[in-house]
Image (cartoon, grey):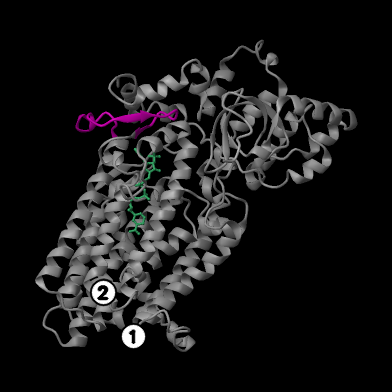
Amino acid sequence: MPTVKYQKGDRVMGRWPGSSLYYEVKVLSFDTKSQLYTVIYKDGTELELKEQDMRSAAGFQARSRSRSRSRSPGRRRSRSRSPARTTRRSSSRTAAVVAAAATETAPSSRRDTKLKDPVEVRLTPLPQTKAAENNTNNKHEKAEENNTANKVNETSEAKIEGEPEKNQGRYNLRRRRDDVDTKTDAAKPEQPEEEEAAAKLAAAPAAALSTPLDFGGKIGAYFWLLFLPAWVLFLILQVNLEDPSLTNFPPPVPLLESFWDAQALGFVILWILFQALLYVLPVGKLSEGMPLRSGERLKYRTNGFFAIAASAVVVAVAVHQGIDLTYIHSNFLQLATATLLISVLLSVYLYVRSQYATPDQLALGGNSGNLMYDFFKGRELNPRIKNFDLKFFCEMRPGLIGWCLINFAMALAEMKQQGLDAPSYAMILVNLFQLLYVVDGLWNEEAILTTMDLMHDGFGFMLAFGDLVWVPFTYTLQAYYLVSHSNPLGPLALAVIIALKLIGFYIFRKSNSEKNNFRRNPSDPKLSHLKTIPTATGKSLLVSGWWGVVRHPNYLGDLIMALAWSLPCGVSHLLPWYYMIYFIILLVHRDSRDMSECRRKYGSAWDEYCRTVRYRIIPRVY
Ligand code: NDP
C-alpha cells in the first residue's frame, strides 16, 4: 500500500497553479487513483495538487527563510509565472497580477526553472455571474436543495459542517470576489498582498486557464490529425473489397486522381447550404442553452425534425424526377475526400476566428496555447456568425441527416447491384434502426444542449471532422457493406435483433430525457421522487432513477443499440462490427473525460456520487 504523505486536515503549503508561489492550504482529501490531493486555500479556492507541489509548513518556512536572505525581491518578481501565459490575450493582465503577488515565498532560481514545467492542477470553473445565479433553474435548484430532507443531501451537508463560509466559496470564486468588493476600503489593507493577488488571479477569466491536456496531449494532436482522415479513407477502400479484412494491408490504393471529383465537392457544398437554409428558416422553437461562464444563455433554433422531414421530401421528389442516388455509392470515396477538405477549411477558419474571441468565449479544454492541440481540440466554445451557431449546426444537421441519406442510397444501390425488387431484411433493419436514432436525436434536439460537446468542447477539427466526415462516412459502413455482402436473416434472428434495438433505445431515450429534464427544470414535479446530491456550483446530481443505476446509463443504451446495428451484417467480417468496437472505445474514453470534468466541477460531491453509484456503464461489470 503506498503511504499518503499528507492527511486530511493537515495544513501545508501548496503551490499556486502556474506560479512559483506557495500559500497555506488545508488538505481535504487524497484520491488514490489520480494521486492528487484536494486542498483548500485560505480564500476558499479548492484545487487538486500533486504531492510535489506541496510542502510541509515547517520545512517550507526554514527553506524560504534561507532563500530570502540570498535573493532580491526584484529578481523574484520577474520569474513568477502566470497560468494565463497559455492565452495570449490575457497573459499580460494575469502576469501583472502574479508579479505583484511575488513575496517572501519565492523559491530559488534553479527551482524557478524547474517550475516552468506545467503544474498539473485542475482549476475549479469560474463562477456564474449574478445573471446566471439569478436564472430560474438555479433558483429552483437552490430551493430544491433547501427542502430535500429525504434526499442524500444530508450526507454532504454533514461533511461541510463547521466550514460554512469556506464551502460556500468552493467552486465559486466570483462570489468571493464580490464579497471582497463589498468590504469597506478600510478593511482591504488588512488582506495580505499575496492573498489579494491570488484572489484576483483566481477571479481572472476562466478561459485564461486550461484544463489538463487530453487525447495524448500535443503529440496526440498531431497523431489524430493525421490518423483520423487516413483511417476513414482506409475503411472506405476496405468496404469496396469483396473480402474486406484488416489483413489486407496495405489496401490496394487507387490512383491519386480517383480521390477527387469536382462534382462530388459541388454536391457536398449544395447539401450543406441546403441544410443551412433549413436551419435558418424561422420554423420551430428557439431553445435556450445552458448558462455559459459569462452567465449568458444562447438561443438555438431547434428545428431539426423539420429539417429531416423537409430533406426527405426533397430527396423523394429528386428520386421521382429520376436523379440516381446510387451516385453516392459509386462516388463514396470522392464525396468523403470533398467533405474532408471542407472540414479542414472550416477548422482553419474556426482557429483563426478564435484568436479574436474574448477569454470567456474560449473552451477550457482547447486553450492550451499549443497551436496544433488547440486546432484539433477547438478553442472557441460557441462560434457564431450572427445567430448562426456553427457547432450546433454541424453537430445536428449536414452529417446526421446526411447519414440517413447515404443509408437510403445504399439500399437503392443494393437493389440495383443484386437485382432486387426491395432491399434485404438486413438492409431494411440497418436503415430503420439508424433512421430511428437520427430522427429521435432531431426530435429531442434540445437535449443536445446539455451534452458535453455543446457545453464543454470547443469547436475545432475534432468536432468539425467528426460531425461532417466521421459520422456520415463511417456510420454508414454497415449499409455500404450490405450492398455487396448479403446476409439473409431468419425470423428468430430478426426478432432478437429488433428486441435488442428496442431495449437499447428505451434505456438510451429514458435516461437522456431524465437528465435533460432535470437539468432544465430541477423542480419538475415528475422528477420529485428522484434523489439528488447538491454540489457547490448550485447544480445537483441525480443519484437515483436511471442515473442511480450506472453513471452513464445513456451510454449503455447506446451500446446495446450499436450491437443491434451490427448483428444484421452477420459475423463473416469484422468491418461491419467496426462501429461497435469504435463505439466501445469512444464511450469508455468519453466516460473518463466526463468523470474528470465532473470531478473538476463538483469536487467532493462528485466523489460522493461515485461512491453511491459504483459502476460507470454496465451494472456490476464496468
Ligand atoms: P451526457 O449526456 O451523459 O452528459 C454528461 C453530463 O451530464 C456531465 O458532464 C454532467 O454535466 C451531467 N451529469 C453527469 N452525471 C449526472 C448526474 N448524475 N445527474 C445530473 N447530471 C449529470 O454525455 P454525452 O454528451 O457524452 O452523451 C450524450 C448522448 O449522446 C449519450 O446518449 C451518448 O451515448 C450519445 N453519444 C453518441 C455518439 C455517437 O457517435 N453515436 C457520440 C457521443 C455521444 P452537468 O452536470 O454540467 O450538467
Is any atom of residue 578 visible in this view?
A: yes
Towards the viewer: 333 or 284: 333
Q: Main secondary structure of the magenta part?
A: loop
Instruction: State the image coordinates of residue 519 (x, y, percent, origin top left).
Output: 32, 37
Label 2 is placed on what type of residue? Ala
Label 1 is placed on what type of residue? Asp
Is residue 210 on the magenta stretch? no
Mark 2 sits near ligand 1, with its Cβ under 8 Å away = no
The answer to whether 94 is drawn above or below residue 495 in the figure is: above
Is any atom of residue 323 visible in this view?
A: no
Task: Describe residue 53's horizontal placement relative to residue 359 as left or right.
Answer: right
Mark 1 to mark 2: distance in Å?
Answer: 16 Å
Towards the viewer: 333 or 313: 333
Instruction: State the image coordinates of residue 24 (x, y, percent, origin top left).
Output: 67, 25
Mark 1 sits near ligand 1, with its Cβ under 8 Å away = no
Towards the viewer: 39 or 86: 39
Residue at 27 percent across and 75 percent down: it is 571
Q: Residues within 10 Å of mark 1 (few under 14, many from 20)?
A: few
Instruction: State the image coordinates of residue 68 (x, y, percent, origin top left).
Output: 85, 28
Identify the magenta region: 521-541
Indicate the secondary structure of the residue bearing disc 2: helix
Q: Mark 2 — residue?
A: 479
Is residue 527 on the magenta stretch? yes
Q: Which mark is residue 105?
A: none
Q: Mark 1 — residue?
A: 243
Indicate the secondary structure of the residue bearing disc 1: loop
Count every numbered label the image shows and give the total: 2
Task: Between label 1 and label 2, give the one nearer the viewer.
Answer: 1
Residue at 66 percent across and 46 percent down: it is 118
Instruction: State the image coordinates of residue 204 (x, y, percent, origin top left).
Output: 60, 34
